[in-house]
Image (cartoon, rainbow, N blue to C red):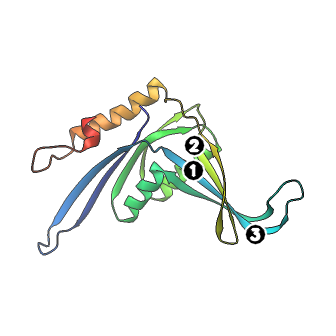
Amino acid sequence: MRGQFIWITSSHLTPGAGAHERRTAAHHGRRRPQLDRYLIGDATKLNPEQPGVVIRVEKEEDRLGGAAAVAMIAAGFGARVTLAGVVGRDEPGRRLQQLISDHGIEPHLWTDDRPTTWKQRIIARGQLRPDRCDREVTTAISDHAARFCQQFLSVTCSSFPTTAKGSVPRACSK
């Protein structure tokens, strides 16, 4: 099992009817919850050691990335979102969990010994530099973590409303 799951529920007014309608969606994909880190500053001089510039870092920002970014966007539109996935027992994992909570996303996260996926980017003078540092483990998650995420998918899919044609979302049919 390589994918992570996002469970989204939103309530909105149906145009013209004036009644509340609940919409639910499940997303299953290969993207995992990750932390995106940005180093922001200015290019101050040419690097004397190799071709390139030296960036004087003025601030750092942590943002939700991967499946967590998808969940954040849905939550921003007013959806109730549950995010299932795996994070590490490390500082990036704790920061990722804090950001998930700050955005009103309900976490269903397995904490594991593998490191949390994070990607670091550099922004100089408002432009994203082509360099990026990735820290991620690409091997399959543990059997315990897979069962934890599968349990989430089983529970959510059993309560997932069927469409008029009687079908369920593709994520639930896997």
Callout 1–callout 2 Cβ contact below 8 Å:
yes
Q: Which mark is residue 35?
A: 1
Residue 14 left/right relative to 135 = left
At 45% from the left edge and 24% from the top edge, which residue is drawn? 143
Residue 70: horizontal and vertical position, in percent?
42, 55
Q: Quadrant of residue 90?
A: top right
Residue 83: horizontal and vertical position, in percent?
41, 47
Q: Which mark is residue 120?
A: none
Q: Amino acid at mark 3?
A: Asp
SS label for mark 1: strand
N-term mark: 1 or 3: 1
Q: Which mark is residue 117?
A: 2
Q: Is residue 125 above or below residue 37?
A: below
Q: Which residue is mark 3?
A: 42
Residue 168: horizontal and vertical position, in percent?
19, 43
Residue 138: horizontal and vertical position, in percent?
54, 34
Q: CA distance from mark 1 to mark 2?
A: 6 Å
At 58% from the left edge and 32% from the top edge, which residue is drawn? 114
Q: Is residue 90 above or below residue 70?
A: above
Q: CA distance from mark 3 to mark 2?
A: 26 Å
Q: Is residue 17 above or below residue 29?
A: below
**Residue projecting furthest to the top:** 143
Residue 31 left/right relative to 49 = left
Q: Nearer the viewer, mark 1 or mark 3?
A: 3
**Image quarter of the C terminus:** top left
Q: Quadrant of residue 60?
A: bottom right
SS label for mark 2: loop
**Label 2 neighbourhood size at 10 Å, few (<14), some (14-19), many (20+)?**
many
Residue 117 left/right relative to 140 = right
